[in-house]
Image (cartoon, rainbow, N blue to C red):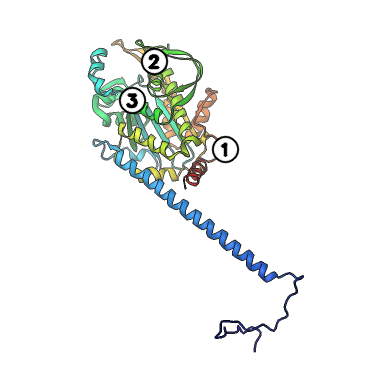
Amino acid sequence: MSDKHRPRRAKGGVIPPSSAPVASASEPAPKRVRSRRFRIIVIALAALTTVLMVAGIVAYGYINRLQTVFEEERNVIEELDDLDDDTAYRTSEGTVNVLLLGSDSRGDEEEQYRQETGEEGERSDAIMLVHIPEDRSGIYVMSIMRDLWVDIPGQGQGRVNSALSAGGLELAVDTVEDMLYTHIDHVVTIDFDGFEDLTTALGGVYVENPRSFSAGQQNPAFYPEGSIRLEGSSALRFVRERKSFPTSDHIRVENQQLVMRAIASRFLSGDTLTNPQRIFGVLEAILPYMEMDSALDADTIVSYALGMTNLRGSDIHTFTMPAGEPHTTSGGAQVILPDEEMMGLLRESLADENMGEFMRYTESLDPDPGTIAAPDDEEPLGLHVGRQLGQSISRDG
């Protein structure tokens, strides 16, 4: 019989004794040890696989719920069905430009506010362009001062924020596109009630206030210099105040950027990312007050996010669009003139996908550029978010 032959089990269920010598008690039994180790490895791998499967199921359910909440709660801007118009050739196919508009609509208090101020129509109180280049090398969030004196298509010259009241969102998009010679892919609007609820859902945000000031004539709020906490109405008053500053619109834009960076940092913090209920709370608080074009759905946002997982906090830049000197128009309006030389450079940088060089040049003029810093500035945002979500899944699982 060959040594390689495997004896069959006897009818009684007992394997016939082997002719091989039996190891003494003092001798090691390597096959048995290897077998035990093998079983331990198999058990460990099975346990790990089970954990990963459970984590995967939890993660899938978590992401699926986020997408469901987003789709159920988001409001679509019906008048902006298709932004893929004849300006699309101005940007590369993979470039993404999002126009963010903070509306000064005041809900039930709107009519009373108009009567008190004499203003007619809705105006955009905060205007920002989010530029994401085709190679996903960074995110550039540019604030546009609302008092900037520009050409409004079909209307003549006016403040850039007046385009919204003169011709709705379509004219606001056309105005920014013509001013920057670029193409807008998406539009998102938010009113101030949503801004209040967002900071509340985050549990407040913290900013380093560079200057002390008071906001409001009735029941004024005081904001001291240094680290301050903002939440709800206090955050809203902080970003809207302009009369307390000699260069009103400049400082207000700076304050808006401070709070925006604080919101982003708070959202990326472990306190938020490891707390699914807080994340859902943020979505449920902000989405009812937001409107966006129909193309900006959950799948589109996920695809954008997946392309930017290697970005770090230092790759996200916030800055103010170059502007010139204050000016009084013939009609007595106090406005801000554009800086034509820097505007030309900005247009070229947007068209050539060269915003990195533009930022390096402008940062050489401003020693304190704005960046949204993640808790670990050297860690890619995708890794940071994934790690924090993993901790949350492990804890809740």
- Which callout, 1 or 2, points at the residue further toward the start of the chain? 2
Neighbours of disc 1 within 10 Å: few (<14), some (14-19), many (20+)? few
Is residue 320 positioned above or below 185 on the image? Answer: above
Quarter-of-image position of residue 157: top left
Disc 2 is placed on an element classified as: loop
Residue 255 lies in quadrant: top left
Residue 29 coordinates in the image, percent (x, y)? 71, 70
Category of crowding for the residue at label 3, using alpha-carbon neighbours closer than 10 angstroms: few (below 14), some (14–19), many (at least 20): many
Which disc number belongs to residue 378? 1
Taking depth in this image into account, of 150 and 281 the one nearest to the observer is 281
Q: Amino acid at mark 3?
A: Phe
Q: Which residue is mark 3?
A: 192
Which amino acid type is shown beneath numbered disc 2? Answer: Arg
Q: Which residue is mark 2?
A: 242
Q: Is residue 129 above or below residue 92?
A: above
**Which residue is located at x 47 percent, y 46 percent?**
393
Is residue 179 among what the camera can see?
no
Looking at the image, which residue is at 27% across and 30% down?
A: 169
